[in-house]
Amino acid sequence: MQNRDPAEVPGGYDVAVIGAGVVGCALARAFTLAGAKVVVLEKAVDVLDGASKANSAILHTGFDAPEGSLELACIREGYALYHEVRDRLGLPLVRAGAMVLAWTEEEVAGLPALMEQAMANGVTDIHPVSGAEARALEPELSARVLAGFRVPGEHLVDPWSAAHGYLLQALANGAVLLRQAEVLGGRRSGGEWQLATTAGTVTAGLVINAAGLWGDEVDRRVTGESWFTIKPRKGQFVVYDKTAAALAGHILLPVPTKITKGIVVCRTAFGNLLVGPTAEEQEDREHAAVDRDTLQALMRRGTEILPALAGHEVTAVYAGLRPGTEEKHYRIRADLAPGYICVGGIRSTGLSAALGIAAHVLRLAGRGERPLSDPVWPRMPNISVDGTRDWQCPGHGGILCHCELVTRREVEAALSGPMPAGSLAGLKRRTRVTMGRCQGFYCSAELARLTEGRLTQPMLEPRHD
Amino acid sequence: MTDAEVIVIGSGPAGLGAATELARHGQRVTVLEREAEAGGIPRHCGHYPFGMREFRRLLRGPDYAARLRDAAVAAGVTIRTRTSVTALLPGGQIEVTDDTGPATLSARAVLLATGVRETSRAARLIGGEKPGGVMSTGALQGLVYLNGQRPFRRPVILGSELVAFSALLTCRHAGIRPLAMIEPAARITARSPAAWLARLMGVPVRLETDIAAIHGRTRVEGVTLVTGGRRVEMPTDGVIVSGGFRPDAALLRGSHLEVDPASGGPVIDRWGRLSDPAYFAAGNLLRGVETAGWCWSEGRRTARAILAALAGELPATGGGRLVLSHPALRLAVPQILGPAGGACPHDRLQVRLDVPAKGRLCLVRDGRTIAAARLDGLPERRLSLPLPADPGAGALSLTIEERA
Ligand SMILES: Cc1cc2nc3c(=O)[nH]c(=O)nc-3n(C[C@H](O)[C@H](O)[C@H](O)COP(=O)(O)OP(=O)(O)OC[C@H]3O[C@@H](n4cnc5c(N)ncnc54)[C@H](O)[C@@H]3O)c2cc1C
Ligand SMILES: Cc1cc2nc3c(=O)[nH]c(=O)nc-3n(C[C@H](O)[C@H](O)[C@H](O)COP(=O)(O)OP(=O)(O)OC[C@H]3O[C@@H](n4cnc5c(N)ncnc54)[C@H](O)[C@@H]3O)c2cc1C
């Protein structure tokens, strides 16, 4: 499936998608299934290396999205499509349900408006709860919660397998992925784009900018100017040990403000407990650093919500960058240049909305006239708590990562196939290897042996002696 | 029918020491080990000293591990490697998985000897990014001794427990020259001779200093050090996050067995028995890191308690639950203190501190001190208190009478 020399493709591609974040992966899938010949251009050594590498992994219903917005429409459609495709692609869904919790009288007063907004947004499965009812549902919840409402439709997903699945399906049906292919510039002539990339020149009729944190820059490189500016917004998280997952069934949300959805406490699809994210503006688009003071503040907040969290260990900490812009909404436009669509500013709901965004862009492009009649549906290996894990099946070769119960067969599979891992980070996203309690105390040595010579970006510098 | 008389989980010095002793007394013993080879941590400690207590010889870790394995096999122990235990069920049933898939095994007694791991960078809330080249001593030893790899050239070492000096030895072996050893406390944690090694290798020790952040997107490029309020940037290509040992108690936490929040390991009585008497525990799992020899001997003594249990000679479980009543105390094992008997493996209370303390360590029952020992201790140092044969019924507490 991989085509290392894009110049060899006669006649070029119908569509070039710039960026293999969750949005680019969903776009590649939608256009491929619609019958287009698609190339995905990704500058990093592996996919999901930008905004999509770190998120809360909540599949949002859109109950709190701005009324009448494109974002809301994409979340609603994306949510429905995820349910539609997930069985066939083998994507997990942990039906947690959410509770929006009010901690002050002022927040209590704001609840009815939020519930009305949810109804207006088409999320009608909404149930008000008193503080006592909330605690009956969540026994570990703080006594300070005054009231709230339930949104049973909010669910948990795996932060990466959906995007991997979308792209794998595109590849299985003829799309091409080029990694280490940074788009440097573009020129349109004779109804076609010539894209200059670090992997050679790529020709395509339609170019879609899904460059996430670099959306404005790619606009400039291809069309000469940009109509928006990326304002990265960092979110830090604390992940607690699996022992803490039993403390909360629901996704526990605060009453949202204009700026942020606020600090969430929820399980993860891998059976841990997550507290985060923060919302911090920064200039830098590459570096997402965590800092101890903020992490400690998150832990304090987590313990206010679930007092019993105090006794549990921290397994991981991480940070992600949202590709925000100077405006609050999605920045999708098809009229900037002929044969060019910008899909920018997918800030904080891209995981939920990706399939909806892709369907919307497909309509914008006027495609979909010759869909594949019998597309291939590859199945993603399950690495979440929703379903059977590989270690539960014979022939797995033994467990390599003991904390996350990752088998040798799983690691082997992630290092081969149509989209082999390009870095340790990519291998982690595919398998969760080293992401558990011991963070590599036991498995690093064997992992270094297994991956030697097989990752574009090696785990260790090559041996010098 | 049971799959073995006794199942031992973990093949480190404690597990193999116990299994050998049990097999020599005619028991059918199976050791389950998740790694490809038995031997536990010493397998990748390519340095001295190991083996004085067990074999009366100075050995390197891998040779020592090989001797433990040979002794076990010679005694008739069955060792199953690449077999991970995934759950502990009541009454000595356990769930395992290996290449053939999951299975349930049962035994009359199960010994847990799953050892420890170091506290990760994440759990220490070190800031910054997540480049490659940040690892525990255990991971470093695996890369250096098992693989012959050199993950970095000029790293910094965080921590000054004894294991940090293993990190130094490992670095020396691989031709890695650490830039500095960083210790948040005001003094080196390990016994003083260990500090000589740092000096010998020309590695400066920076006390009262912490790593605030690690920089670099794919590889470590530097660290931010903080001393008091002062921040200093130090370019470096790796970080060894050493020590802060935690019992590897993942299995316990998901089970019906009682865990001691103070030690992070199981609650045991003086026979090394857990809250379900089909289960026993020994080795580092009990309290964090000790020497291999200590763990081996603890394993052997616990084996004798298991033999007594199989012969129906152990008293029923019960006894006072020890309460720690001084803020300097981190943990004390065993936690349940009933009367002692012939084959009792724990005739002393093993104690660790969180902060340095001086004075008298006192075991108190109903306001009366029933055992005491002089105390002049530091965190991570081995401390103990001889236990009375029968501490008697009633609430027991451990405290420190501080010296004015
Ligand atoms: C803290 C946090 C929490 C979140 N929680 C949730 C949640 O719970 N639910 C939810 O639905 N969403 C959530 N999100 C939002 C979601 O993660 C984002 O909306 C989504 O990842 C955006 O994806 P993208 O594909 O637009 O961008 P990206 O993932 O940034 O993808 C862009 C890609 O383009 C590549 N690229 C850039 N420039 C070039 C170039 N010149 N040439 C080639 N390739 C290039 C980049 O390397 C990158 O891989 C969260 C986000 C954050 C940060
Ligand atoms: C870096 C380092 C250097 C050291 N240097 C020295 C030294 O120089 N001299 C010295 O005397 N001591 C040294 N020690 C201490 C010594 O290695 C340990 O005290 C000793 O190995 C502990 O023995 P143990 O049997 O309790 O556990 P371990 O040796 O840790 O063995 C536990 C075993 O249990 C297995 N296990 C865990 N969970 C499962 C499961 N679910 N299923 C199956 N198997 C499982 C593990 O894979 C492991 O093999 C060092 C320790 C470290 C970490």
Image: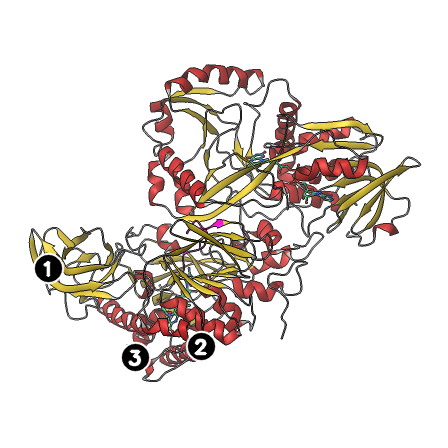
Q: Give the amino acid at mark 2.
A: Pro
Secondary structure state at the residue bearing disc 2? helix
Q: Residue furthest front?
A: B230
Indicate which quadrant contains ligand 2.
bottom left
Assess disc 3: are there few (<14), some (14-19) or many (≥20) residues with their C-alpha within 10 Å of its C-alpha.
few
**Residue highlighted by disc 1:** B391
Q: Are marks 2 and 3 on the same chain?
A: yes
The relative height of residue A229 versus residue A270 in the rendered view (above or below) is above
Q: In the rendered structure, does residue B119 fall within the stretch colored magenta?
A: yes
Q: Chain of mark 1?
A: B
The relative height of residue A147 versus residue B232 in the rendered view (above or below) is above
Q: Give the amino acid at mark 1.
A: Pro
Q: Give the amino acid at mark 3.
A: Arg
At 54% from the left and 23% from the top, the residue drawn is: A64
**Picture coordinates of residue A129, whole percent (x, y):** 40, 21
**Residue highlighted by disc 3:** B53
Q: Could you tell me if the residues under marks 1 and 2 are in contact, i.e. CB atoms within 8 Å? A: no
Q: Could you tell me if the residues under marks 3 and 1 are in contact, i.e. CB atoms within 8 Å? A: no
Q: Is residue B262 left or right of residue A11?
A: left
Q: Marks 2 and 3, Cα distance to the nearest angstrom?
A: 16 Å
**Residue highlighted by disc 2:** B62
Q: Which residues are magenta?
A: B118-127
**Picture coordinates of residue B265, whole percent (x, y):** 31, 56
Assess disc 2: are there few (<14), some (14-19) or many (≥20) residues with their C-alpha within 10 Å of its C-alpha.
many
Which comes before the other along the chain, label 2 or label 3?
3
In the image, is the residue at mark 1 within 8 Å of ligand 2 by its beta carbon? no
